[in-house]
Image (cartoon, rainbow, N blue to C red):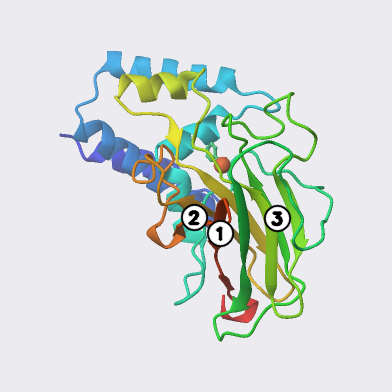
Amino acid sequence: MNESLTQNVTEAFGHCADARTKEIVTALVRHLHAFARDVNLTHDEWRRGIEFLTATGKKCDGIRQEFILLSDTLGLSIVLDDINQHHDDGATESSLLGPFYRDGVKEAALGANIAQSDGEPVYFHGVVSVVSGKPVADALIEVWQTAPNGMYEGQDPDQPEGNLRGRFRTDADGAYAFHSIKPTSYPIPTDGPVGQMLLATGRHPMRPAHIHFRIDAPGYEPLTTALYSSDDPYVNSDAVFGVKPSLVIEYVSKDGGYDAARDFVLIPRERA
Ligand code: BEZ
Ligand code: FE
């Protein structure tokens, strides 16, 4: 094995003026070389790898981003979340934003119903607070989830505008509440190279049922997270690795529907 090959290449970046770019590119070279040596990569295998990456690029357009899907299914997106999340004891953990977040949803009064699709009714409620326990009033809460057919509004022309998307403000006690329906598990898009990769490697494309939350309040780190259903068959095998045990909730049967109680804990900006 000729170790000097890797050294020659990293030294070729030695004049890079930007220190961070140099750090990233030389580490990438070291890890790429180590990977190729680790698996004894053949020319034919790398040619097929390049064909796969080319097809991934060709699948991208203004809406579809196959490279993000690749990053998600390789677990890289959730590793980045982990690296960049401000960890603080007691604070709510983050989870993937995903591609279906949409800005500009009209704010609704607390207690409103965000569902225009039929489904099993759920009452979501809880309190937003700081690690110290102090409630966070007037925090912006944005939520979005799939309909029972496994599609988000925006993927599905048959769903009414704004279906299963909500935007609320916590009250003076930090409380939020809204009505919706029970989320459904759904497959990530499989009609591209990432879908072929999952199929070829014996993996399924399903995300367990979840509802996304984004919580933002002045003076606090914004929180992007999701709540996963404990009774979902895919809760332990999420295709994009977004599930964390602390984000799994139980839907408790109540009044012919479900009650889903969940508090969120933010991190003050100065502590982050
Ligand atoms: C989502 O939860 O919406 C999602 C996340 C990653 C890939 C595809 C979908
Ligand atoms: Fe989602």
Quarter residue 3 falls in: top left
Q: Nearer the viewer, residue 151 or 219?
A: 151
- Using residue 218 as the reference point, say whether residue 50 is left or right of it: left
**Alpha carbons under labels 1 and 2: distance apart:** 6 Å
Q: Is residue 25 visible?
A: no
What's the amino acid at mark 1? Asp
Residue at the spot of label 1: 259
Q: In this view of the protein, can residue 165 be seen by the observer?
A: yes
The answer to which of 214 and 10 lies nearer the viewer is: 214
The amino acid beneath tag 3 is Glu
User: Which residue carries the number 3 mark?
Assistant: 142
- Above or below 72: residue 19: below
Q: Residues within 10 Å of mark 1 (few under 14, many from 20)?
A: some
Circle 2 sits in a helix, a strand or a loop, which is it? loop
Expressed as whole percent of the image width and height from the top left, the position of residue 181 reads 62, 45
Q: CA distance from mark 3 to mark 1?
A: 19 Å
Q: Position of residue 188 (x, y in %)?
A: 51, 30
Residue at image point 29% right, 13% down: 44
Residue drawn at (55%, 28%), measured in percent from left and top? 66
Residues at marks 1 and 2 touching, judged by CB atoms closer than 8 Å: yes
What label does residue 251 carry, if any?
2
Which label lies toward us, 3 or 1?
Answer: 1
| Residue 222: % across, % down | 65, 64
Q: Which disc number belongs to residue 170?
A: none
